[in-house]
Amino acid sequence: MFLKSLSIINNTTNTVIREINFHKGVNLILDETSSANKTESGNNVGKTTVFRLVDFCLCGDGKNIYTDTEFGNTNVEIEHFLTTNDIIIKLVLVPELDNASEEIVIERNFLSKKQSVRRINGENYTKNFEQTLKHLLFGNCAEKPTFRQLISKNIRYEKNRLVNTIKVLHQNTNFEEYESLFLFWLGVDFSESGRKQQLYSLKKTEENFQTKMHKSTDMAKISQALSVIESSIKELENKKNDFQLNDNYNKDIEELNNLKFKESQISAIISRLEFRRDLINENVNALNSKQANIDTEAIKVVYEEAKAIIPNLQKSFEDTLHFHNQMIDNKIKFLTNNLDELLSEINNYKIQLNVLLEKDKDLSNKLKSLGVLEGLEEIIRQLNIEYERKGNYEEQKRLLEDSERRLMQYEEELNEINKGISNQKEFITNRVKHFNTFFTKISKELYDEDFILVDKYNDRALTLIIDTISSNPGTGKKKGQMASFDLSYVQYADSLDIKCLHFILQDQMESVHSNQISSLFAKVVEESNCQYVMTMLKDKLPSNMDVSPYVVLTLSQSDKLFKI
């Protein structure tokens, strides 16, 4: 898919505020603000906002369009402008730019609930918006990787995507999620991605449960304790049998013992359920404690001081903070999903226990009224205690055995899934080799170096890394590495008919040397069947280069993106 156009439309007046038409090759968003003029800045004219608007149309939340991502301050003027005018962002994608082809028209606004617009080709999607785009753009309906993960490397304006070439997801993303994404990139069929991630989560839960249980007990202790308790019960039963009692009394004693045993079983179940409840609450509290609450005003003072020294200092702190907290909120929702049902179950068992206790009380009073011998009473009391202890230990044993069984099942299934990946190692390695034929060629053209993609495996998942024969690349070279990787991927995907986005949005290219900029403009991008959309300050471009054919949008302090 290619970018055809991006429009900013005032739905209240039915007027187009800005329309950007894209073409193949380099698409330059140019900021005419001069760095020589110290009183002006190119940070607020809307260069990066263009990328954010594209991202918004592709299921981004859009808050970063009017919120300072580092300090959390809301630009009230822009938010008011977007909402009161019912601004609609319209993104048009096409399979081919050169030929007339069927368009995919995506429209979104910044209103909520019933006023929210999330249209695809004229149809509003209150649900399945992201899944529909995933199917249309990638022909994929699998749970993992998600649509947002699939497009992550194509839209580079957030901090982690500006410093990491392939680790483009949130910093807390686990190996299994990356493996799913990497296999999709390589075009390796792996339908078990979602299940593997689910199994890893379940396995981790069981391991946490067992760790908590093992702080107070283990199977060896339980086995020994049960052996001692059973011997004690046998001895007490023999002593009880030494008493000569009538049949009715024996029947009452047996019923009382049964009641005590049921009480101990239900008490143990309640303990287990309360243990699960406490474990959920403990995890929720731990996650809540990880919510990043930082004095943004204090950070803002530091930022302002830093900005005086580094004018182009990027605003990315609050964006990371918000995404981190959102991830935690999702985990909390997952943990508490069945909490109400668990509490209801605990309450039902407590009701059952109270009924048994009432029967116990009535039967005990009846036996006392018959004048039970004190010795027998003591034996029965001790028996009840031992049966209750036995019930508790048996429940602990059952809990651990069930947990061990589940853990074994998860590990066996994970091993089978990993075996399926392992069986494709040679195929995966060959795919990586094929990718490197493009990657090394482009990196050679840009830097006369051989960047290479390497497939590695740890005990959990496949991972991909980028290596080079030379030392670690600097900031500018890192951007060049990203360009090499992203452009190589388009060539690689096309060579294998893998569906991909044929546009790359790259922010902050000012740190790239003019030699590489010239190479990107003149040759590398032109050799790729794609669009390379980049933002630049005008006076950071090579002075001897005519960039007019590449410019799709020019902004300045007097002509900002939203024209307000």
Image (cartoon, rainbow, N blue to C red):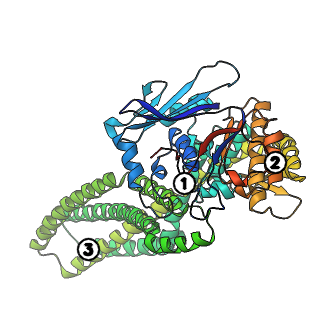
Which percent across, then down, holds residue 343? 30, 57
Residue 513: percent from left, percent from top = 79, 56
Amino acid found under the numbered disc labelled 2: Asn
Q: Is residue 539 above or below residue 472?
A: above
Which comes sooner in the sequence, label 2 or label 1? Answer: 1
- Image quarter of the N terminus: top right
The disc, 3 or 1, on the residue closer to the chain's N-terminal end is: 1
Residue drawn 13% across the image and 65% down it: 362
Q: Are marks 2 and 3 in contact (CB under 8 Å)?
A: no
Residue ID for mark 2: 544
SS at mark 2?
loop
SS at mark 1?
helix
Which amino acid, by three-letter code, is at mark 3?
Ile
Left or right of 122 on screen, residue 531: right
* Residue drawn at point x = 44 percent, y = 61 percent: 72
In the rendering, at what x and y percent does residue 509 appear? 70, 53
Between 140 and 424, the one lying in front of the other is 140
Residue 201 tag number: 1
Label 1 CA crowd tier, 10 Å (few <14, some 14–19, many 20+): few
User: Is 410 placed above or below 99 here?
Assistant: below
The answer for how far apart the CA atoms under marks 2 and 1 are is 56 Å
Q: Is residue 342 above or below residue 424?
A: below
Q: In the rendered image, is residue 270 in sight?
A: yes
